[in-house]
Image (tube, helix red, strand yellow):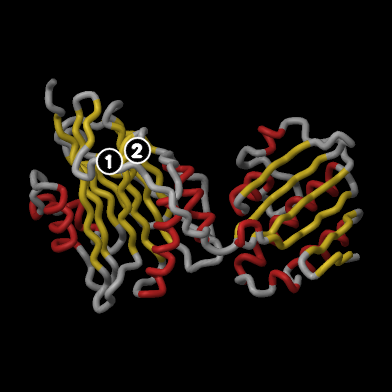
Amino acid sequence: MQLEQCLQEASYPLRHDIDLHLTVMAVRRLPFIANLSEVDRAMLSTVVSELGSNILKYAERGEITLTLHHPSGRPCIDIVARDQGPGIGDVHQAMQDHYSTSGTLGLGLPGVRRMMSELTISTPPEGGTLVQARKWLGAAPLVSRPIPPLACTGQLHAGLQLTWASENRPCYPERVSGDLAFIRPGPEGVSLILIDVSGHGASANKLVQVLEAALQQTREQEPARLLQLLHQHCIGTRGAAAGVALVNGERGELSYAGIGNTRICLRGHEPWRGISRDGVLGERFPTPLLQRQPLVAGDVVMLYSDGISESLNLRDGALDLAAEPAQLARQVIAHSGRSTDDASCIVLRVLAGKED
């Protein structure tokens, strides 16, 4: 059944259910993906299962090809599914969550899109459907993309001034942290990103460096899309949790989405606690829940990892909420940080802007 054209490409014609069953098993044993993690091999098999099920259900026959490429020196796996069926009438609908072919793992094309780095669907001139999916392997090369310097102490928008700081303490007795507190102003506001890699110490910090490099190379600020980017870089790794907030001073609005055990709370005019969906970046990626909350002068936003005790939300009396963000972040770690885990915190304060 398998027609190997070279050591780095394999094609599988599909006509019957048994063809797909054998193909899925064969994919996991391909020589050119043997060095991938078990998670990555399982992911590629799942993608083949979903695309192959579409072929058999809607086109009755077709072909799936897997190829290992090295564009720009970085390896990737391309999965191409071709058929001569009627095509996909509504690609937009097919890409929506909960739209799936029957008899599959229930992931459908939305699941394929989440597991792969790139996905395109087209109708060739000769008819049928062509699905092209690419999965980048390993960390992206560190390309210098300088970002124009912005004020690190504040940002003024339509009467609201934002000031921020972070604190990150490694788990004792480690010297480096498995948490990342990443803050960057941009055209849509100030991005606050807190990542808690599974485990701690040097091995966890290696993934922290990969994720920080990925954040440095993107200008994306929308929380759900940033979580998707982080998820893609975590596949095949130990995994992580992350909370992403975007504070827009011009609109006076906080947007937040999180996956895993990161937490966010708002203290001030209208106290609020955000919700992070259950999941693990790189393993289980549910649809992010985007939450929006209005902000006014005097509000304090605190985003923190699970190395901070839940009692933080009940101990405002132990914290000086009027302190500068850097001092307040240190207080949060000192009062509620667990010595047995990495502890990190981002604090952002909303102030009334100066009149011209």
Question: Which label's residue is closer to the chain start, 1 or 2?
Answer: 1
Q: CA distance from mark 1 to mark 2?
A: 8 Å
Percent of width and height locating residue 49: 75, 56
Q: Quadrant of residue 255?
A: top left
Q: Residue at x 75, y 45 (%)?
A: 131
Identify residue type, mark 2: Gly
Q: Closer to the camera: disc 1 or disc 2?
A: 1
Quarter in which the N terminus is drawn? bottom right
**Residue that numbered label 1 is attached to:** 150
Could you tell me if residue 25 is visible in this image? no
Badge 1 marks a residue whose secondary structure is loop
Q: Number of callouts in the render?
A: 2
Q: Residue at x 65, y 57 (%)?
A: 71
Q: Which mark is residue 66?
A: none
Q: Is residue 27 above or below residue 60?
A: below
Q: Residue at x 31, y 41 (%)?
A: 185
Percent of width and height locating residue 198: 41, 67
**Residue that numbered label 2 is attached to:** 186
Percent of width and height locating residue 296: 20, 30
Q: Is residue 47 above or below residue 34?
A: above
Q: Quadrant of residue 252?
A: top left
Q: Are marks 1 and 2 in contact (CB under 8 Å)?
A: yes
- Mark 2: few/some/many CA within 10 Å (<14, 14-19, 20+): some
Quarter in which the C terminus is drawn? top left
Q: Is residue 87 above or below residue 36?
A: above
